[in-house]
Amino acid sequence: MSSNWQPQITVEELKSDPVEGGSNGVNESKMESHGGQRKKVVVVGLGMVGISFIEKLMKLDAKRREYDIIVIGEEGHLAYNRVGLTSFFQHRKVENLYLNPKEWYSSCPLGSLNYHLNTKVTEIHPEHKLVSCSSGETVPYDILVLATGSDALLPRHTPGHDAAGVFVYRTIEDLQKLIDYSAKQKGTIGAVVGGGLLGLEAAKAMMDLDAFDKVKLIERNRWVLSRQLDADAGGLVVEQVRNLGLEVLLSKRVGKIEVTEDNAVKGVIFEDGEKMECSTICFAIGIRARDELARRAGIKCADRGGGIVVGEDLRTSKEDIYAIGECASWENQTFGLIAPGVEMADVLSFNLTQAKVHSYRKFKRPDLSTKLKLLGVEVASFGDFFADRDGPKHLPIRAGRKKEGSPDALRKLTDGPAPPPVKALTYKDPFQAVYKKYLFTMDGKYLLGGMMIGDTKDYVKLVPMVKNQKQLDVPPSQFILGASKEGDDGGDDLDDDTQICSCHNVTKGDVVQAVKGGSCKSIGDVKSCTKAGTGCGGCMPLVTSIFNSTMKSMGQEVKNHICPHFNYSRADLYNIISVKKLKTLAEVMKEAGNDPASQGCEACKPSIGSIFSTLYNKHVMDKPLHGLQETNDRFLGNIQRNGTFSVIPRVSAGEITPDKLIVLGNVAKKYNLYTKITGGQRIDMFGAQKQDLIAIWSELIEGGFESGHAYAKSLRTVKSCVGTTWCRYGIGDSVGMAVRLEERYKSIRSPHKMKGGVSGCVRECAEAQNKDFGLIATEKGFNIFLGGNGGASPKHSELFAKDVPPDDVIPILDRYLMFYIRTADKLQRTARWLENLPGGIKYLREVILEDKLGICASLEAQMEELVGTFFDEWAEAIKNPEIRKKFQQFDNTPERVQNMELEEDRGQTRPVYWAKESVKEDFRNTKWTSLTWQPVIEASHFKGADEAPNGISATIKRGDTQLAVFRVKGKWLASQQMCPHKRSFVLSDGLIGDANDKLWVSCPNHKRNFELNGEQAGRCQNDEELSIATFPVEEREDGMVYLKLPPVHELDGVLGTKKWMVKKGESGEGPFEKLDRRLGPNGVGMRGRKPFEAKKALAAGGPNGSIDW
């Protein structure tokens, strides 16, 4: 069998219901392992502890990538919240219980996680390091983690236990069977056996079904929750749940289940002989560790109580096999709560990944504190809550027991055991149904544990006092008298290390850091990021309070919404899209937009497209993303004045070979491109026709080039001097470092463009101190400067760190750039971002260098993942036939048209200067002599338009006139192609915006917005002097799109290209005519030689037009 597996059931095929007919096994994977040989971690069990271990292992292994994980789940569902099972009775949707959405599993790095449902592991072969499935397939492992959980107990010694109508309360399948059966038992009595946590949950579930006339709870003890509460507290709970309609029978044991002739439940007979009618019985009497798989493999298991025996490192008796969660027996104990299992997952994932450079962690006595809301009753127990009954398990060192041999020890031999060295402080309010019992050491200086009913808001403050064994600074009475102060439940007085979610071991500091780090902008984000509130949910009020308080402290009331379509900033949207893993404009609009059906606009679409690229890095010309792209990204080149494009290949750090220079020269010569050296040390080639771009890129790629991403809001260049490569003053290899930085961060989209620089010494020839990030070599490494830029508002960068070793430069820049990408506003350069950052450069140092927010590992991991997804956008476009089709001037004819006159300047061809004035003609109200329907293009061109974020457009040539046709949101629209602002023929490539059924197109050049429908069709929204002509359009049964147009000669007379293309002289006198009269043409009159007139003796001909060197 293949050593790599792929999911037996893909995410796309997986339904919310259990998978019917799934075979016990999987198909062989066709995924290839990537990178070096990785160890296989096989996890048996996809429950809450299993998925917790997987998440933690993947997070800690993100940098090293030492492990590939295979998880095998016996159930037909992804990992779900078993603690929240009761809610299933309301919504009946298993996906609402999923701990991670389906998409999470498929979004993991290739090969890192493979999961299998409906698959049962039947044998473990430790000697061969294999596990067998019931299908006969075997799976090899390097490390095996058993997270098989536990089974609900069913009293098989009780007659009638196998009757129809007998259920347990453990899995989704158990609940579904109970739901289906109860639907046929209307008006009868339902019974729950067991008054523990699970029993009360089951009782509530059966009451919520509304199928039973009455629900009765049967408990063998004198009170409920006997494992968490004493008699007084348990009695108070009984009183409250009875008031809620649940009938509770105490001190009762089921002796026999009475059945009908069809073997269906009709009642129970208790051991005392009393009878009770019922149609349905749900047993919730406990659980038993699932250790049968381990026992068959010879792995040591506990004789009493069951469970796979593990040590403090969670290792079993067999090498490389571990056990975690409810199936594990540690010091002869198994744990039926989620928190100890999550702690085990923490310890094991840490030891497998970090122990090579850190000391091993040990699993220690877990905290069994619980806080729940059962049938509307708040219940909590914490610490050593039975210390007064059983004696304290552990005493603080300073409050330890007296030494043996003391008079007290001698008295014990004669008088019997002394009472536990514990004092209890009890408070009971029968009117408010509140009960509290706190247990202290004899001197009252240490809190040991306690229990609470009704009022549990002090729980999160008391638990850390017990765990930390910190001496109290107030008398015990204050815990009761001062327990209920108005407004004292906001968490402001809690330390950051206070645990607020016991299910997932989340502290207050975890929530605060998640919020301050910018990754959580809503309660939903906090739950996704930290897992707080995704277990029992009892911590949510406190989590919400901490979230609100933290947001308020950060001044989040300031509104910087990205556009009228969203009540969120760009950073807010980034976090929403990231946490919720949204991947289309429609999903973003549905989750965060003011109008879920909106198409967005020219302001929000590019920002959302950029966020998608940052998070998922898919090709920007793919159909779901193309309609979001800004002017330049739409065709992977900077659009120029005459509608042509510039082509700028990557020349990392400005270092280029003679052979590559020749390639550039040949391409520029062949396609008559204007060439210029840019300020970023690369060569820009202007004037490329859209329909020539594919051919140009093909020749460049064949010559060893790739896209330079000069068209994108991304890294442009990392400029360098020659440093120690050549310079006699250089003390650092500036070229080598610049090449590495540019190669690492190339193509990464960001809120605005980014530029870098590296200088080899303090002479600073690379101008590194006015870049978004810059390095200057020192004898000990590099000084790092951040947050500078040139442009309209130039700013010197600020010194961030000194003498940084070369190996440490990348991690620092990874964190800085990703923090900027996560938190900056739309089109905000790093300079403005840093100016607006609370605390400025000092705070940035704390975040990046000191990890103040605890997010550095996340920042590095995200950058590493992004860097790892690099691909050349030009090369991918060339290979994709669908993308290639987009590179043509007109969609209804292969003809070419020049949109602007050209002139020669300094030996090269360029477009003439723009005309001085815009066209003020009232195109909108043109009076045509007649209009007739005329076919212009096949409707198939617009296939998929209604699902695309910007619809689909077409550029049509009709006579000498250029027209733009759009299919958007089920509507057909058409207009002239020319934008009257600068007479550019570009409107078909504009972004579509909408508001209240009004649609407009935004000119790609200067964002003039023209309405396309309604009474104001043709009007310019931001320049009332401008307008465009619009035309009726419809699709007909013959498969063609028709426009209602005037005769061709009339159309050309109003909108013809020859009429409106900008011609030489329309701009008036040239900008240098007066100067050139004094200095000579192009300023060469002062020289003895005229370089633009003296032609080199280079033969620029030959049969293939290449340069003859």
Image (tube, rainbow, N blue to C red):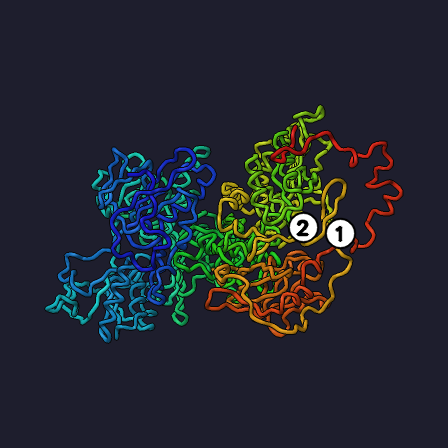
Number of numbered labels in the structure image: 2
Residue 938: x and y, percent?
50, 61
**Vertical arrangement, residue 179 with respect to residue 1082, above or below:** below
Question: Which residue is at the front of the view, 137 or 367?
Answer: 137
Q: Quadrant of residue 354?
A: top left
Residue positioned most to the left:
261
Tell me if 95 is positioned left or right of 927 in this view: left
Q: Secondary structure at mark 1?
A: loop
Instruction: Give how far across and how far down residue 159 sits, in percent.
Output: 13, 61
Residue 1056 vertical position relative to residue 137 in the rendered view, above or below:
below
Left or right: 857, with 221 as reference point: right
* Residue corresponding to mark 1: 913
Q: Could you say which disc has been placed on residue 640 in the image?
A: 2
Instruction: Name the residue located 55 percent from the left edge and 58 percent from the top edge.
Output: 892
Cα distance in 3D space between marks 1 and 2: 12 Å
Q: Is residue 202 above or below residue 38?
A: below
Question: Nearer the observer, disc 1 or disc 2?
Answer: 1
Q: Label 1 amino acid?
A: Tyr
